[in-house]
């Protein structure tokens, strides 16, 4: 997009995505290589990074609706950078502990929740609702590139400068993100708030809005089922590749990199599919492309069939991204500006809340029925994710216009 504000947001998101991907690898390695932590401690550390959406996601949405979104994102970047810079500082002073790493992970996770809810709520104001699919496609492309290159770059960085100082590079990435966001000059009106109003009724208002909307609850249900299925499948597939097939880590990494390339292709195609079909049929098309591919995953073997399955998985990832770009864009179109933060927080709570459940389900099924049957079951669940979008007819879609005092593109 040619909009200068979006270009700054796009660049900020590129730095933020890269830093986040590297951090997922760097922070646990600080604990393992620097502090000799146990597997349980590392698991708890990873949980501290990811638990925030479930704990604080809903009130974060209400807070975001009370404030201008861009300053929230800038502040979140500054807080993330400050928390992460404390790690190499304490390491250099010989004072680093696991308790500090836990605290850093929690602070970083909470700040990321505010950043993500803020940017999803800020985007309709920045680019206009007519350009949401195009904007989300470009942002999803950055996420897909980070998924492919982030772990590899992180590994090389950690190898070159050690994990604690790689965390310092993460902090610089978040600082760069905040600087680019601070450079956006498009005015943002102050949200209307009720003096002395309680936070909890506002949170419940967001939940009621999603549940009561004829299409948003279907999007939430479909995405939640999809994430449940894919997280279960990913666990079983990883056990299949690393355990049953005994493939080396490099081969496994390349196999999953194919999915990242498929996701990048899906991000490029998402806008074209939406222009041809409109966002809701594009969501159905994306899931319809992904669902049959999921049934091919259990046929992976340690020969040429591995790369055939990897290619099919790339197609699955492309369909998933086409679905995701259009569902995010459509829910932004359908929601009034004053409700965007709470709507996005509610949707994220519903959608991401099934990820840990899917991981547990994949591990349980893989243990008690076998990894290949577990992947088949997960593929069946993924197919069910089409159901909420297909049942009950087609509700009339009314796109919410921005408020009159919001500058128009």
Image (tube, rainbow, N blue to C red):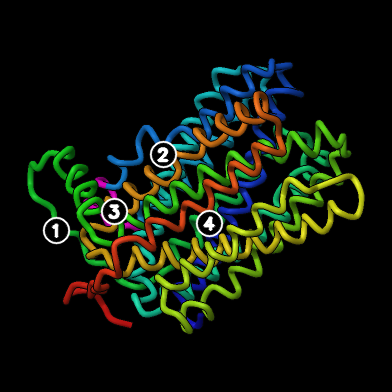
**Magenta segment: does it hold 321?**
no
- Comparing labels 3 and 1, the label whose residue is closer to the camera: 3
- Comparing labels 3 and 4, the label whose residue is closer to the camera: 3
Q: CA distance from mark 1 to mark 4?
A: 28 Å
The residue positioned 84% from the left and 56% from the top of the image is: 307
Mark 1: secondary structure = loop
Which residue is at the far right? Answer: 303
**Res. 343 mark:** 3
305 over 185 or under it: above or below: above
**Res. 53 mark:** 2
Residue that label 4 marks: 177
Q: To which quarter of the image does residue 376 belong?
A: top right
Q: Earlier in the sequence, mark 2 or mark 1?
A: 2
41 over 353 or under it: above or below: above
Q: Is residue 61 left or right of residue 52?
A: left
Task: Tell me the magenta residue range.
Answer: 62-70
Q: CA distance from mark 2 to mark 1?
A: 25 Å
Q: Is residue 249 visible?
A: yes
Q: Classify mark 1: residues with Cα within 10 Å, few (<14), some (14-19) or many (20+).
A: few
Q: To which quarter of the image does residue 126 belong?
A: bottom left
Q: Earlier in the sequence, mark 1 or mark 4?
A: 4
Residue that label 1 marks: 192
The residue positioned 24% from the left and 73% from the top of the image is: 396
């Amino acid at each position: 997009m040619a909009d200068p504000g979006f270009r700054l947001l796009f660049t900020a998101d590129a730095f933020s995505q890269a830093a986040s991907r590297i951090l997922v690898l760097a922070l646990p390695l600080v604990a393992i290589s620097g502090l000799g932590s146990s597997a349980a401690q590392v698991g708890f550390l990873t949980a501290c990074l990811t638990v925030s959406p479930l704990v604080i996601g809903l009130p974060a949405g209400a807070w975001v609706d009370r404030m201008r979104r861009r300053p929230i994102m800038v502040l979140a970047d500054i807080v993330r950078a400050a928390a992460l810079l404390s790690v190499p500082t304490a390491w250099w002073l010989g004072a680093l502990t696991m308790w500090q790493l836990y605290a850093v992970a929690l602070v970083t996770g909470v700040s990321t929740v505010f950043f993500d809810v803020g940017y999803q709520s800020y985007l309709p104001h920045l680019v206009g609702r007519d350009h949401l699919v195009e904007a989300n496609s470009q942002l999803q492309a950055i996420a897909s590139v980070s998924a492919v290159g982030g772990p590899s770059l992180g590994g090389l960085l950690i190898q070159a400068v050690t994990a604690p100082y790689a965390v310092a590079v993460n902090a610089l990435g978040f600082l760069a993100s905040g600087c680019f966001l601070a450079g956006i000059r498009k005015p943002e009106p102050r949200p209307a708030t009720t003096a002395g109003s309680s936070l909890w009724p506002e949170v419940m208002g967001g939940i009621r809005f999603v549940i009561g909307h004829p299409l948003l609850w279907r999007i939430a249900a479909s995405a939640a089922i999809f994430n449940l299925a894919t997280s279960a499948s990913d666990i079983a597939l990883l056990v299949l590749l690393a355990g049953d097939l005994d493939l080396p880590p490099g081969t496994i990494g390349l196999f999953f990199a194919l999915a990242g390339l498929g996701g990048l292709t899906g991000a490029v195609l998402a806008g074209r599919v939406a222009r041809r079909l409109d966002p809701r049929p594009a969501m159905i098309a994306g899931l319809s492309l992904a669902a049959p591919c999921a049934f091919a995953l259990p046929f992976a073997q340690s020969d040429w069939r591995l790369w055939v399955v990897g290619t099919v998985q790339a197609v699955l990832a492309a369909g998933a991204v086409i679905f995701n770009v259009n569902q995010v864009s459509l829910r932004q179109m359908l929601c009034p500006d004053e409700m965007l933060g709470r709507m996005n927080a509610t949707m994220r709570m519903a959608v991401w809340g099934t990820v840990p459940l899917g991981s547990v389900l994949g591990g349980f099924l893989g243990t008690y029925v076998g990894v290949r049957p577990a992947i088949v079951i997960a593929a069946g669940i993924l197919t069910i994710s089409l159901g909420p979008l297909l049942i009950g007819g087609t509700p009339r879609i009314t796109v919410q216009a921005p408020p009159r005092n919001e500058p128009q593109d």
